Amino acid sequence: MCGWSYKDDEHDAVVCAYYGWLNLDNLSAYNRVRRPLVQAAYLRFLEKERIARDIRIAANRGWNLMHREFPEGIVKTPSASCERIESIWPFIAGETLTDRTRSKQRAKLTDSIGTAARLGFSGELISYAERVCHLHDARLQVKREFDSFLARDEYAWIKPVFDEFGFSTFERTIFLCQFDPFGQFLDARGKELRIELKRRKAHGGKHITRRIGRNKFHSVMGKAIYPWSSGNKEGHIVSGSQLARNHWYLWVNRQIGLNYSRQGNELIESFKRDYERDLGVSLGALEQLIALSDEQLCDGIGRIEHSAIASALLPLIEMAQKAKKSPSAYLKAQGKTRLRMWAKSRVADRAVKVLFKKLTFAYKQR
């Protein structure tokens, strides 16, 4: 910054002081600092992510061994979640189970065609089962800590909003760690933080305002969209917290894709209608693109490459080009899968906007 070739403590101190003086009123020039309580919860959440990853690794290795030792025990039930675990792991590890569950697993083991029926479980499989049970208990302990963290009085105004969206404990924790304190997105009157661009005016003659508060909220939620260009190529990229963005997708997949939400939730039902509409429109547009010739597709890419709808249409054109080689196989497999993922992402984008509006209103009324 200063063009110096020296690297010692005195010159470092001068540069740090000069940088601070230049950015006295620009908080975005510094690293984000969470409150100690929120920072501790965030670090604990990272530990939870590591625990979940280790559970998947140990379980997958255990399933591989069970194909030889106890294939009848490979039953991955949808009920297995943070609160519950497949009964096969405590059974192999020799931990406490109900009499009914233990007798059921023993009956399976007696009639099994695997090696465990004659020789018993191998030490390697038992160690994997013990590790899965141990990590599951650790994840339950983390969940209890998060429940206590979310139950604090200072977050009571957030709970009704989270309940309306049907967020899980882990989703509530990571989202809260991302946007706390919520007042950073609002001005002194409790309204969305905006700035007026003095040199830019709209068609009506009014100055254009930039929605600083909402854009920053989208960024911490992992849903900030920025323009991207490289040479002659232009497009948009999604930026922000990847951890929060992943949990937004998991929430949409659970509440809308798998339809786990309770009936009667008007907010979730509206998101489901949006998802079905996006998927239907995308499939219809893809079928029309497939009917075009290669020259027409290339001409279409050139026309929309510099337009605002490029980020929406270019993925469809890319899928149409691949689907032309084998339309039936591509549409049945990869094409529809990618379209569903795209539709879920669109629903998550809308959900972030709705969440910001509801949190803003709840913050004023708290």
Image (spheres, grey):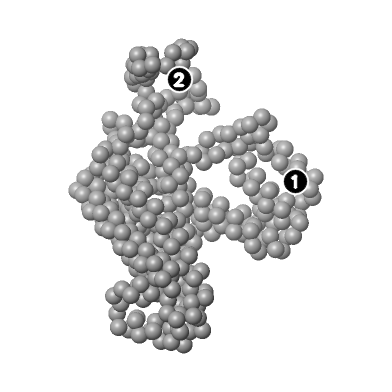
Q: Nearer the viewer, mark 1 or mark 2?
A: 1
Q: Hey, which quadrant is residue 14 in on the image?
A: top left
Q: Residue at x 39, y 25 (%)?
A: 29
Residue 183: percent from left, percent from top:
29, 36
Q: Percent from the top left, x then y, of residue 45?
A: 34, 49
Q: Nearer the viewer, residue 245 or 54?
A: 54
Vertical position of residue 262 compared to residue 340: above or below = below
How many residues crowd mark 2 within 10 Å: few (<14), some (14–19), many (20+)?
A: few
Q: Residue furthest left?
A: 153
Dot label at residue 297: 1
In the image, what residue occupies the spot 39% across and 52% down?
A: 50
Judge from the rendering whether residue 34 lies leftward or rightward of residue 291; answer left or right.
left
| 23 on left or right of 276 | left
Q: Distance between the residues labelled 1 and 2?
A: 41 Å
Under mark 2, the amino acid is Lys
Give the residue at x 51% y 54%: 344
Image quarter of residue 276: bottom right
Are discs 1 and 2 less than 8 Å apart at CB?
no
- Rate crowding at label 1 as few (under 14), some (14 to 19) or many (20 or more) other CA atoms within 10 Å: some
Q: In this view, does 242 lie above or below 328?
A: above
Q: Is residue 246 visible?
A: yes
Residue 22 in view, yes or no: no
In the depicted structure, whether residue 186 falls above or below residue 174? above
* Circle on res. 198: 2
